[in-house]
Image: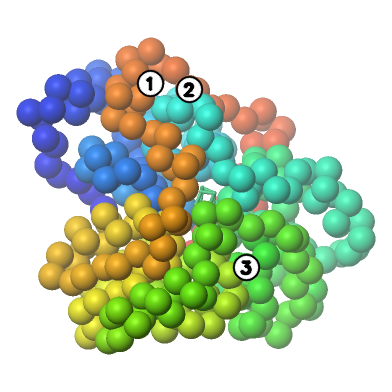
């Protein structure tokens, strides 16, 4: 989504617009970012869309409003460009749940099995993997991996969901997103009791008991397509609450109810307009990946981008 209007009455937003021109920068924002960040970004999307944007941009500087693994992915795909993460503390607990040495041990335990890693991983883990995937293409990528057995890391919920739809055998890592784990089946039942005609859309990072109650299991980009096309007018959204802002913008005549207001990612919310401004002013928060790791990680990411 390209944001055309800039609220230049806001001095911070106006300063960001100046700096963006001076630095020849592009601002990318994940769908889970604060509404004001989504509004000032040049492009808002999910991990796959943002990876594609990063790979295609001719800007010299990429300001990544998201978490560290996303900025690392941009750095891997764009050697020679400066990638800024406006708050260096913005990490992802799910990505931190597996390390490269742990993945190497897993590969020894499952010799010959290809590794599919969710994009929510460090560059080191991607460098040890054969394919990267996002929630929108996890099934497609797994199906394309050679052989009957696939090592799938690190998200167990996404992995279990893929396992339900493939004949292949997945060896799963027991990682999870603490934000999506906060959404319970009881939350869905309660929301459905209040909105009996609503359609429930859940992200595959949610627990299996939540996915069992959902009418649709979709990535954030899939959610946008669905709410535009579906006949339903009310939707219960089981994912990080920042998504509600994006959905309201994309389908303004429809109603969106968060499955749980507790599903708020504190890392995603670390990025503020002020931090974007300071980062562009000082060129602070630069993210880089060592060359050897970047080359290996790029192979896994590019295989994913080819599969689409
Ligand atoms: S929502 Fe979950 S997976 Fe996404 S950045 Fe936050 S902790 Fe990581």
Earlier in the chain: of badge 1 and badge 2, it is: 1
* Colouring used for the render: rainbow
For disc 1, the marked residue is: 279
Count numbered badges in the picture. 3
Distance from Cα at disc 3 to Cα at disc 1: 35 Å
In the rendering, at what x and y percent does residue 111 appear? 90, 63
Q: Is residue 153 left or right of residue 179?
A: right
Q: Residues within 10 Å of mark 2 (few under 14, many from 20)?
A: many
Distance from Cα at disc 2 to Cα at disc 3: 31 Å
- For image coordinates 30% across by 24% down, the residue present is 274
Observer-nearest residue: 114 or 17? 17
Earlier in the chain: of badge 2 and badge 3, it is: 3
Circles 2, 3 touching at the beta carbon (< 8 Å): no
- For image coordinates 48% across by 82% down, the residue present is 213
Of circles 2 and 3, the one toward us is 3
Distance from Cα at disc 1 to Cα at disc 2: 6 Å
Which numbered disc covers residue 285?
Answer: 2
- For image coordinates 32% across by 15% down, the residue present is 281
Q: Residues within 10 Å of mark 1 (few under 14, many from 20)?
A: many
Q: Secondary structure at mark 3?
A: helix
In the rendering, at what x and y percent does residue 156 appear? 67, 65
Circles 1, 2 touching at the beta carbon (< 8 Å): yes
């Amino acid at each position: 989504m390209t944001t055309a209007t800039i609220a230049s009455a806001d001095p911070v937003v106006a300063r960001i617009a100046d700096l963006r021109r001076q630095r020849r920068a592009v601002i990318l924002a994940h769908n889970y970012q604060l509404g004001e960040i989504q509004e000032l970004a040049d492009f808002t999307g999910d991990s796959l869309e943002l990876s594609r944007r990063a790979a295609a941009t001719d800007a010299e500087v990429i300001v990544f409003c998201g978490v560290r693994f996303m900025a690392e992915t941009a750095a891997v795909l764009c050697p020679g460009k400066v990638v800024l993460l406006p708050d260096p503390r913005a990490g992802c607990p799910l990505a931190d749940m597996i390390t490269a040495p742990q993945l190497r041990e897993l590969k020894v335990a499952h010799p010959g099995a290809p590794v599919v890693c969710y994009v929510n991983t460090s560059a080191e883990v991607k460098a040890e993997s054969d394919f990267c995937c996002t929630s929108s293409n996890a099934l497609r990528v797994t199906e394309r991996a050679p052989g009957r057995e696939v090592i799938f890391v690190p998200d167990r919920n996404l992995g279990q969901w893929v396992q339900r739809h493939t004949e292949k055998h997945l060896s799963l890592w027991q990682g999870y997103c603490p934000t999506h784990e906060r959404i319970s089946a009881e939350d869905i039942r309660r929301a459905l009791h209040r909105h009996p005609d609503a359609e429930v859309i859940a992200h595959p990072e949610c627990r299996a008991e939540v996915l069992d109650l959902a009418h649709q299991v979709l990535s954030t980009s899939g959610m946008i397509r669905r709410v535009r096309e579906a006949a339903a007018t009310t939707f219960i959204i089981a994912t990080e609450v920042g998504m509600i802002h994006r959905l309201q913008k994309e389908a303004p005549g429809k109603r969106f109810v968060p499955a749980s207001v507790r599903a708020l990612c504190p890392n995603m919310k670390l990025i503020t307009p002020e931090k974007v401004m300071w980062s562009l002013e000082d060129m602070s928060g630069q993210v880089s990946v060592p060359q050897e790791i970047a080359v290996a990680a790029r192979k896994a990411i590019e295989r994913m981008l080819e599969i689409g």
